[in-house]
């Protein structure tokens, strides 16, 4: 996929940002073009070779209309997670590695419910934090709101869901 300056994009490992420029660099093996992605919420500028963007899984940020879908997923019934921590962490890790916003929302929802019903391991807790951080950052980027407000919206949505929806264990 080709991206343009100003496009809002998501790198599956670094998170969301905007393409600030496309630069040419002279290297030993010739000239290469790079997307320069500004990620202000993380204080990063990342350079991705134009020819490798698809290989690393870079994608356009979700459309603003998908914000409502994310909130519906967070409010929805959780999918029960395996009690075996290795199986659970593999499933959640797979969802997080996709970098896709709807997968992130499902992982956050399911781990938040699991935390209410059972103990989270250190890795589960780290996966929940990572999923929430990535989800929060993309929601903020797309909505034009602050990271703080996007995080508060996720927290309020999950708090309401936990209070009003019986878990399906």
Image: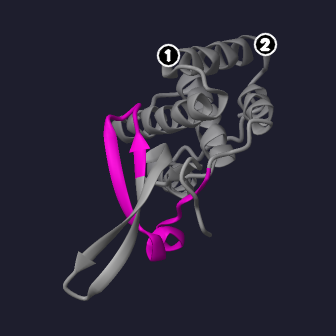
Q: Secondary structure at mark 1?
A: helix
Task: Looking at this view, name the residue that lies furthest to the bottom.
Answer: 29
From the image, tell me which residue sits under label 1: 148
Is 162 in front, or is 70? Answer: 70
158 horizontally vs 36: left or right = right
Mark seen at residue 135: none
Q: How many marks?
A: 2
| Residue 1 in which image quadrant | bottom right
Q: Classify the position of the C terminus by image quarter.
A: top right
In this view, the mark in front (1 or 2):
1
Q: Secondary structure at mark 2?
A: helix
* Residue at image location 72% in from the left, 12% down from the top: 160
Is 98 in front, or is 4? Answer: 4
From the image, tell me which residue sits under label 2: 164
Residue 156 visible from this viewpoint: yes
Check residue 166 for magenta coloring.
no
The image shows residue 110 at horizontal and vertical percentages of: 63, 36
Is 44 in front, or is 67? Answer: 44
| Marks 1 and 2 in Cβ contact (< 8 Å) | no
76 horizontally vs 131: left or right = right
**How far apart in space, not on screen, are marks 1 and 2 (Cα)?**
24 Å
Mark 2 surroundings within 10 Å by alpha-carbon count, few (fewer than 14), some (14 through 19), many (20 or more): few
The image shows residue 39 at horizontal and vertical percentages of: 41, 40
* Magenta part of the chain: 37-60
């Amino acid at each position: 996929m080709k991206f343009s300056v100003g496009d809002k994009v998501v790198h599956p490992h670094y998170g969301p940002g905007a393409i600030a420029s496309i630069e040419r660099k002279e290297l030993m093996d010739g000239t290469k073009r790079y997307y320069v992605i500004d990620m202000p919420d993380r204080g990063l500028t990342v350079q991705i070779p134009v020819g490798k963007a698809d290989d690393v899984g870079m994608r356009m940020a979700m459309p603003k209309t998908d914000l409502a879908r994310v909130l519906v997923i967070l409010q929805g019934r959780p999918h029960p997670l395996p009690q075996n921590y290795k199986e659970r962490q593999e499933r959640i890790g797979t969802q997080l590695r996709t970098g896709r916003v709807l997968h992130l929302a499902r992982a956050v929802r399911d781990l938040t419910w699991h935390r209410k019903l059972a103990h989270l391991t250190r890795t589960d807790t780290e996966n929940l934090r990572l999923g929430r951080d990535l989800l929060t950052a993309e929601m903020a980027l797309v909505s034009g709101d602050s990271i703080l407000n996007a995080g508060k919206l996720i927290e309020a949505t999950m708090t309401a869901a936990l209070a009003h929806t019986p878990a399906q264990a």
